[in-house]
Image (tube, grey):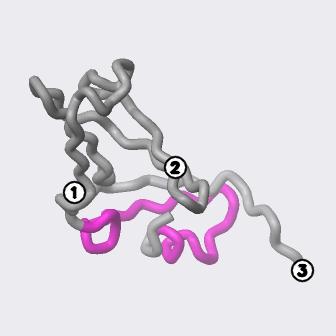
Amino acid sequence: MWPKVEQALTGKRAGETVELMLSPDKGSGQPDPSRILKQRIDHVPPRFRGVGSKPQFQNEQSDVKEMVVSEVADVMVTIDNIDLFAGKTFSLVVKVPGIHGLSA
């Protein structure tokens, strides 16, 4: 969760609603072109050769990251790992359904 959202929710009670705007610097940041992967199409499984398909990748620590195929050309596939909200300002309305895990 973004720190600004956590901060806005701190001290809220069940049933309360929080409204806030998140600018890129308080949310997902700016798009990072280094998070775009280009692969030769013959190195990509056929089921992931379509725009919008979502291949998953696993790193050495077994963390799994879902990415999105954003472009398919004759010999190259572009796989995008940029956060959907990067570079965007957006508003949130969050209603607190309940509070769990607190002890008196």
Toward the bottom, the furthest residue is 104
**Residue 82 in the image, given as x and y percentages of width and height:** 28, 53
Q: Residue at x 79, y 62 (%)?
A: 100
Q: Is residue 65 above or below residue 30?
A: above
How far apart are the alpha carbons under marks 2 and 3?
41 Å
Residue at image mark 2: 58
Q: Residue at x 22, y 57 (%)?
A: 88
Q: Residues within 10 Å of mark 1 (few under 14, many from 20)?
A: some
**Residue 21 in the image, given as x and y percentages of width and height:** 31, 63
Magenta residues?
5-29
Toward the left, the furthest residue is 74
How far apart are the alpha carbons under marks 1 and 3?
40 Å
Judging from the image, what secondary structure is the residue with disc 3 in?
loop
Q: Is residue 97 left or right of residue 25?
A: right
Judging from the image, what secondary structure is the residue with disc 2 in?
strand
Residue at image mark 1: 88
Closer to us: 20 or 48: 48
